[in-house]
Image (cartoon, rainbow, N blue to C red):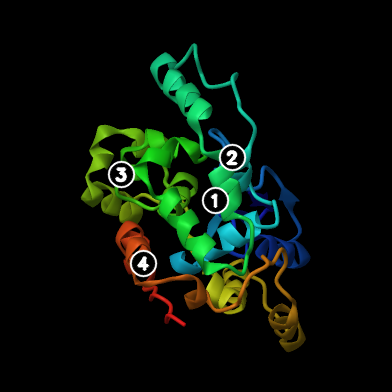
Amino acid sequence: MFVNEKLIFIQLEKTGCTHIKRLLQHFLGGAQHDKHSRIPEGFATDGRIIVGSVRNPWDWYVSMWSYGCLGQGSLYTDLTAPLKIKGHGYRTEPVLALRRLCNELSKARRHWQDCYADALDPQLFRRWLRMLHDPANSYDLMDDYAKSPMSRYAGFFTYRYSRLFVRFLDHLFMPEMKNSDRLYSVLEQDILPDFIIRNESLEQDLVMLLSHCGITLAAEQVDFIHSTYKTNPSQRERKTGYYYDPETIEMVRRRDRHLIEKYGYAAPDLD
């Protein structure tokens, strides 16, 4: 997260968060804490605006995958990392730790690695996306995705959004979360951010946020925001629809439907 005296920015990966942070730092100053993390328990918010960012789910998956094709990102690392024997929580969660260890022993690292071979190959992206949402692979994914009942019906994008933005993290792991209506209720009523920046309207939203922070921008400052290039780009074909087919379009629509409906996102046109 990025913190200054006006706001706390919770950074959801591949939603333009690096670019947003640099612009916020330019206009407001501030300090970077752990990047893609929740607000730590006990951290004083002191009335500051809590900010998050979001992106069209279909585009987000392509960006996450293509970034992995560069050998980058924590998801890529988790999916392709060498065998890990220690650190599964044997003392605190012995049953779950054993399940994690069994998964480590059987993880299809080579298959995951193969999916990242070419950022311009839509067939590899579709294979990766299907593997990502196959329940048999849920323990391969980061941040205890498999531990949450929502992994049975919600996409990984929805889980990452929820993990960073919901007020009470333990709610994601309660049995009640097996009901998608419960997730919908949580996402509508119990998220931390007061203000969400959409990747698709990043510059306009950022100008609005700065106004909420009491910053009046001159015309040249607004032009600066609109002319500054986004950072940390992935290597990919620019049209999202290039990567999808009808099956994978529907997969994302079904599994990330809560966020698609919440933010009014539409599926890309297929090339």
Q: Nearer the viewer, residue 20 or 85?
A: 85
Mark with earlier residue (2, 3): 2
Q: For residue 78, which numbered disc appears in the image?
A: 2
Q: Amino acid at mark 2?
A: Asp
x 69%, y 51%: residue: 71
Q: Circle 1 sits on which residue?
A: 47
Locate residue 247, reporting x and y percent.
Answer: 34, 66
The numbered mark, 4 or 2, whose residue comes first in the sequence reads: 2
* CA–CA distance in space, label 1 to label 4: 30 Å
In the figure, residue 118 lies in which quadrant? bottom right
Q: Amino acid at mark 1?
A: Gly
Q: Label 3's element? A: helix
Give the spatial CA distance, label 3 vs label 1: 36 Å
Using the rendered view, name the quadrant where residue 216 is placed. Answer: bottom right
Residue type indicated by callout 4: Ile
Residue 260: image tag? 4
Q: Is residue 61 visible?
A: no
Q: Separation of disc 4 and disc 2 at Cα? A: 26 Å
